[in-house]
Structure formats: C-alpha cells, structure tokens
Amino acid sequence: MYLRTAEGLGQAPMRYGPFAGTLGDNTLPDGIREFLNELRNHKDLKRLLLTVTFHPKPLQTWLTFGPRKQAILDLLLVNNMLEAPVVFFDHLRRISTDLQKKDAGFRQQIDAELQLRNAMIKAAGKVGIDRDKMKPFLLEPLFTPEVEDYFLPPLALSFANKMLPPRLVQRIKNSAIPEAHLVGLGRFLRRYGEVLQSKDAVFKRVVEQERHKRQQVQQEQKEKAKQAEEERKRKEQRRRRK
C-alpha cells in the first residue's frame, strides 16, 4: 500500500494499515488523539491533511486547526512530540490516504492542489528563462534560511503578483492552502538564486555585497547592544554607591 508524500508527492511505502474507529490511534499521546477526534467532523480536518501533504515543512505553518485553533508546533510541543514529528505526520498521511479512498471530493481536491503546484512551478520556471527578470526577487529568499521558511510566503507572493499570470495567482490565493504553495515557490526562488550564483559572476558579486552589508548591520547591532548593557551596568553601580 502506498501514500502520497509531501516531497514531490512521490510514492512511499505505507507502514501501517488505514485508521479505523478513531482518528488518533493508541500509539499517540492523549492530547494528540483528543485533537484529532475533535477534527473528526470539523472543516479543518481536510485543510490539515492538505497542509501535511503539500507544505514542505508543515511543522512551520502559521495555520491553526480545530475548534481550539491549535498550531501544529504548539500541539507537538505540549505533547512532547517535537523531537519526533514524523510519527504525527505519518499518521496524518495514513488518514489522508484512507480518506481519499472513501471521499471522491477530497481525492479531487488533492489532485487539484497538485495540478496547481505543478502549474505554479512551471510558470515560475518559464519566467526564470530570463535571469534579469528573476534577479530582483532572489536576494531575500537567498538570505532566508530553511529554519525560517515561514517568512517566504510574502516574498513569493510579491514575485507571483508581478511575474506570474493573474489567473494563476488568483488560483493560489483561492487555494485551501495558499501558504503551503507560497513556501514551495519561495524555496524555488531560493534554489534558483543558489544556482544562478555559479553561472552569473555579476549576480554572485551582488549577493556577496548584500551579505557583507547584512553582516555589518548585525555587527553594529551587537555593538549597540553591548554598549547599552555596559551603560546599564554603570548606572547600576552608581546607584549602589549612593
């Protein structure tokens, strides 16, 4: 048996059988099972499953789910699963696989989101044929590390609004999971910028200049913080002498 994976929706072996009875099996913490059972008939269930399927890093999503509006990061943190999120995500993917067999509408929604993602990346690739058109949108994604991918959506949306077909942009905005698609697009821009540096000496110099400028700003901020702390200590010492 196979399931769709978040990375490219390829096929990966399914370790366990489909869920039955309850959305949270007995291997999960009580808080996780309670959360999943609250979602049984909640509109957010499908949105959660779509997020886990399409978001490159679902742990980083800003979205909240369920009647208590819980974020995935917070949910796993309070249930001591932050060190092993794959257990939670694998369980959700099994639920998704089973639901697709039972719910034709959800299966069609999965296919529609996959088509949208493919169309988005294909359109961005066409823009990328002209390096000069891409360059203005590459610096910020390049300086956004993977651990901060949650900052990518507004950068990707800016690119989409200016460079992608309007109808496609509207499809992204109307998606049930626009954030997931925009993170994916932002990662595409970052990777494009990484590759471009090896092929375009001028762009590489621009990136190095930007890196140097950012390092200078960081150093200045550290110096100011250090000076502020030293001044605080001097004031504290003068106060004690009085």
Image (tube, rainbow, N blue to C red):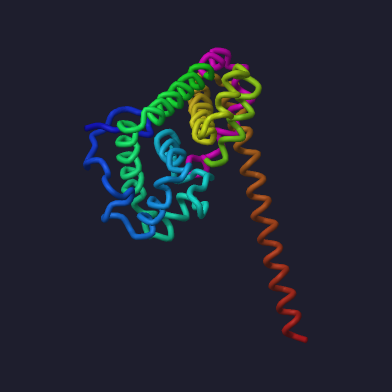
In the image: residue 131, left or right of residue 78:
right
- Residue 170 at x, y percent in the picture: 60, 24
> Residue visible at 64% across and 28% down?
158
In the image: residue 132, left or right of residue 52:
right
The quadrant in which the N terminus is found is: top left
Look at the image and say whether residue 145 sits in the magenta stretch: yes
- Residue 235 at x, y percent in the picture: 74, 74
In the image: residue 169, left or right of residue 61:
right
In this rendering, the answer to whether 119 lies above or below 219 is above
Front one among 217 and 4: 4
- Residue 201 at x, y percent in the picture: 56, 21
The quadrant in which the C terminus is found is: bottom right
> Residue visible at 39% across and 50% down?
36
Front one among 106 and 218: 106
Front one among 13 and 56: 13
* Stretch in magenta: 125-149
In this rendering, the answer to whether 86 lies above or below 134 is below
Quadrant hosting residue 137? top right
In the image: residue 97, left or right of residue 39:
left
**Label total for image:** 0
Q: Main secondary structure of the magenta part?
A: helix
> Residue visible at 52% across and 28% down?
185
Quadrant hosting residue 161? top right
> Residue visible at 61% across and 22% down?
135
